[in-house]
Image (cartoon, rainbow, N blue to C red):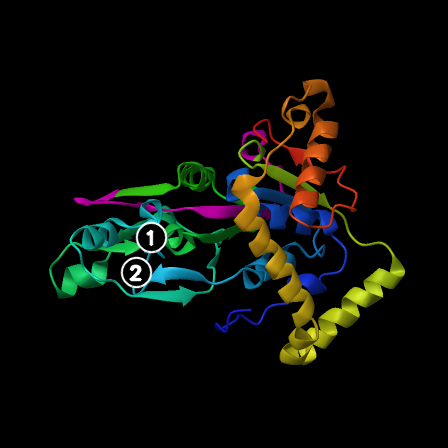
């Protein structure tokens, strides 16, 4: 794995159970065009732990140094206006490796915090109008996680989903006009007991997974023991599962590399609406086999959107 600074989070491969949730997350980072994943389940089912562990599993990305939008040096679709202009003018830019960004959107966030706003400090000290990037800029080329998405303000949800669908964020503030790339894997989670999920919101996610509390006594004890071991000594625990993390990371990298060469059979693409669930299962199983992921798990609870 790349020798970049890692967050001290519970390792993805050490999460016990919840195979459907883990598979949905892996498929989305392999192909972000799936459209994100919505994870609904009771409190204590490991939703947040698993999601936050996902970023550490991914390989580092190359970004333009000191660019707040994580711009790519080679892909114009992933470059901010400033970077694109510098490259067009023939300026040599330095590239550095960075861990895939994992951005949390808090429930109390404002639209300015999400999209960006005027940099008040520069306006007062230098007398210039400058843009202060928001969370969408930080999430570019990474993961954006919204916990309790069913409780998020409707207006913020609309802004978030529009940016996720278009891959761009446009901000007009006090004479300042900024447009920057905002391509990220959108991950939402929620507890059905704390509020209903709007049907139109669910339709905007490519996948949805329902997770249940682990009932098996042996597994519950194992979950507690694993978490206790990590809390007591995070470094030692992470080292004990480093081999599994490396192996899964290599599978993800390989899957990303061969993604564009994968061909889907016509019988999987032409699905009867009456057999949509069954067809969806076969599509997922087929992709798991190609990408060398675990296709042996029971996938019957996956729900695919009409676009899947």
Residue 110 position in % (x across, y down) = 39, 49
Classify 180 as above or below 16.
above
Q: Is residue 24 visible?
A: yes
Q: Which residue is mark 1?
A: 74
Q: Residue at x 50, y 53 (%)?
A: 143
- Number of other residues with Cα within 10 Å of mark 1, as a class: few under 14, some 14 to 19, many 20 or more: few
**Image quadrant where one finds the C terminus:** top right
Give percent across and percent down for residue 217: 88, 60
Q: Residue furthest right?
A: 217
Q: Residue at x 72, y 39 (%)?
A: 285
Name the one closer to the observer, 251 or 136. 251
Q: Magenta stretch?
A: 172-201
Q: Nearer the viewer, mark 1 or mark 2?
A: 1
Answer above or below: position of 266 versus 175. Answer: above
77 horizontally vs 105: left or right: left
SS state under label 1: loop
What's the mark number on residue 67?
2
Residue 29 appears anywhere in the view? no
Residue toward you, 51 or 217 = 51
* Magenta stretch encompasses residue 57: no
Q: How many marks?
A: 2
23, 115: nearer the viewer: 23
Label whose residue precedes the other's in the sequence (1 or 2): 2
Residue 173, x across and y down, in percent = 23, 45
Decide if residue 256 is on the left or right side of residue 119: right
Please state the horizontal and vertical placement of residue 67, each as a whole percent of the image.
Answer: 30, 60
Q: Is 276 placed above or below 137 here?
A: above
Query: In the picture shown, does residue 227 fall above or below 193?
Result: below
Tell me if residue 197 is in the magenta stretch. Answer: yes
Where, by quadrant of the figure, is residue 40 drawn?
Answer: top right
Furthest residue in direction left, as rendered: 127
């Amino acid at each position: 794995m790349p020798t970049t600074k890692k967050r001290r989070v519970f390792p993805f491969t050490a999460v016990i159970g919840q195979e459907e949730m883990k598979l949905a997350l892996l498929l989305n980072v392999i192909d972000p065009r799936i459209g994100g994943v919505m994870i609904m389940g009771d409190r204590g089912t490991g939703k947040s732990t698993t999601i936050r562990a996902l970023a550490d599993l991914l390989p580092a990305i190359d970004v333009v140094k000191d660019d707040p939008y994580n711009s790519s040096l080679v892909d114009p679709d992933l470059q901010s206006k400033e970077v694109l202009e510098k490259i067009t003018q023939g300026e040599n830019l330095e590239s550095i490796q960075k861990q895939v960004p994992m951005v949390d959107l808090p429930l109390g966030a404002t639209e300015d915090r999400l999209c960006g706003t005027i940099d008040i400090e520069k306006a007062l000290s230098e007398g210039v109008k400058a843009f202060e990037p928001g969370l969408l800029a930080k999430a570019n080329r990474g993961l954006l996680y919204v916990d309790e998405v069913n409780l998020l303000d409707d207006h913020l949800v609309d802004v978030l989903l529009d940016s996720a669908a278009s891959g761009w964020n446009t901000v007009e503030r006090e004479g300042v006009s900024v447009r920057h790339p905002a391509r990220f894997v959108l991950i939402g989670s929620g507890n059905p007991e704390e509020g209903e999920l709007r049907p139109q919101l669910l339709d905007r996610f490519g996948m949805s997974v329902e997770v249940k509390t682990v009932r098996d006594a042996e597994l519950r004890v194992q979950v507690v023991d694993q978490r206790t071991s990590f809390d007591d000594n995070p470094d030692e625990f992470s080292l004990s599962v480093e081999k599994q993390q490396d192996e899964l990371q290599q599978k993800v990298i390989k899957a990303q590399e061969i993604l564009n060469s994968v061909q889907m059979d016509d019988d999987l693409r032409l699905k009867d609406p009456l057999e949509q669930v069954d067809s969806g299962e076969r599509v997922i199983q087929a992709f798991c086999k190609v990408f060398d992921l675990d296709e042996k798990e029971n996938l019957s609870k996956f729900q695919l959107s009409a676009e899947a």
